[in-house]
Amino acid sequence: MSLKVEKTDNKNELKLEFNIEAKKFDEGIQKVFHKSAKYFNIPGFRKGKAPYQLVEKVYGKEIFYEDTFNEIVPEIYDEEIKAIDFDIVSKPEISIVQMEKGKELIFTAIVQIKPDVKLGKYKGIELKKVEYNVTDESIQDELNKMAEKNSRLITVEGRAVQEGDVAVIDFEGSVDGEVFEGGTAENYELKIGSHSFIEGFEEQVIGMKTDEEKEIKVKFPLEYASEKLADKDAVFKVKLHEIKEKELPEINDELAKDVSEFETLDELKASIKERLEEQNKAKEKAETEEQAISAVVEVAEVDVPSGMIETEVDNTIHSFEHRLEHQGLNLEQYLQYTNQTMESMREKEKETATKSIKIRLVLNAIAKDAGIEVDEKELSEKMKIEAEKYGKTEEDIKDNEDFKKYIKETLTLEKTIAFIIENAQVEVKKDGKK
């Protein structure tokens, strides 16, 4: 076995020429023959019992070539590329040069390699950090939300429907005097202002009083889902049975007991403040990291190979497909619902994929240039934390090399971002609001 490596005229591309001994190829043919012999039916022989020479004579000597290639090449390819001093980032484009029994198997593979990164300035970059403050208003907003969630609807008497009310109505819709499917309901609770009905309907309910009957005239939009109703004038016969309004609980110690584990409103406020402060810190950290990443990537030069982009898109779509399965859908259904093709979906993902790859390449280059490494203690601690997230022990995942590699790469990127920020000139603005 021999491997010849040469660069092509294209940037970040290699041509690999493999020469596999004739003996290895012939042994592969025999292996494939024995695996597939049962499928060949030769007169005078029981199925699967005909000798190789006769099968070759009847079906042609090339009958096993493709399967033999697929049988022996993947393992050889994987082993050989480990030995070369290049990081291959694409699937190979294979071309057969020679494939014949009794002769060397010769083929070439065009592959793309990890590109070089020309770094710009990454120490002493200028960043602007906003420190967000938790205000009394933001705490009150949270309390108002809690009160809103614990509100109840009460029936009101002696007034007409207002914005924000829930109107309990019967309705019957018709177009050109004919009642249409789906246009009828009894005791329907319509939130006025929700815009859940055809435009203009809710506005005409406003002002109605209990037990009042009214005809409401509206026009279906041109782009309405039902072609029979699109752009049609409709009349709804409406009867109002009841008016309900939202009653909010008083924000006091009793509410605190109802919505939390605390006994007093002051304790609840303190807890809200602590939670908002944690959220603010996370927001500050995320914004600063995003700034730092953008700053160093913008001044770096790197050509992202198309093979890396395609692989990134493959992984993104595969992950998305997996999430769809948990929702009882498949990718084909999703594409139909969203009026997309696989080609258009992949095209949309390419820009995000390119950006993501460039960020990783630049940060990894900075890590190498700055000598940032992850030691075994850091790696072990992080793996333990990640294992616990999935209900596993560190022992369960210690031999998972792919997971270990992923955690190490993640830690390296985290440490690199922290290094950039630590060495940056950070201007702090302290008057940010929650």
Image: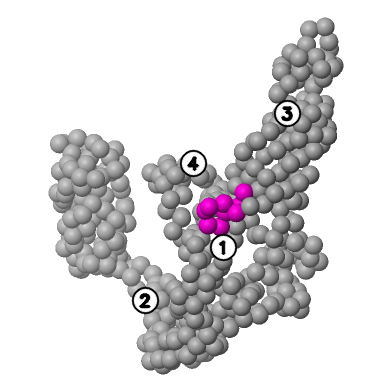
Question: Mark number for residue 115?
Answer: 1
Is residue 320 visible in the rendered structure shown here?
no
Q: Amino acid at mark 2?
A: Leu
Identified at 82% across, 6% down, the residue is 44
Where, quadrant-wise, is the N terminus in this rendering? Answer: top right
Mark toward the viewer: 1 or 2: 1
Secondary element under disc 4, as helix, strand or loop, is helix
Q: Earlier in the sequence, mark 2 or mark 3?
A: 3
Cα separation, mark 1 vs mark 4, equals 35 Å
Q: Is residue 113 above or below residue 389?
A: above
What's drawn in magenta, residue-wise?
A: 7-15
Q: Which residue is mark 4?
A: 332
- Asked whether 111 or 260 is in front, the reply is 111
Where, quadrant-wise, is the C terminus in this rendering? Answer: bottom left
Q: Amino acid at mark 4?
A: Glu
Cα separation, mark 1 vs mark 3, equals 36 Å
Q: Residues within 10 Å of mark 2 (few under 14, many from 20)?
A: some
Mark toward the viewer: 4 or 2: 4
Cα separation, mark 1 vs mark 2, equals 61 Å
Q: Earlier in the sequence, mark 1 or mark 4?
A: 1
Q: Which residue is mark 3?
A: 100
Q: Residues within 10 Å of mark 4 (few under 14, many from 20)?
A: few
Q: Earlier in the sequence, mark 4 or mark 2?
A: 2
Q: Is residue 96 above or below residue 203?
A: above
Q: Is residue 183 left or right of residue 293?
A: left
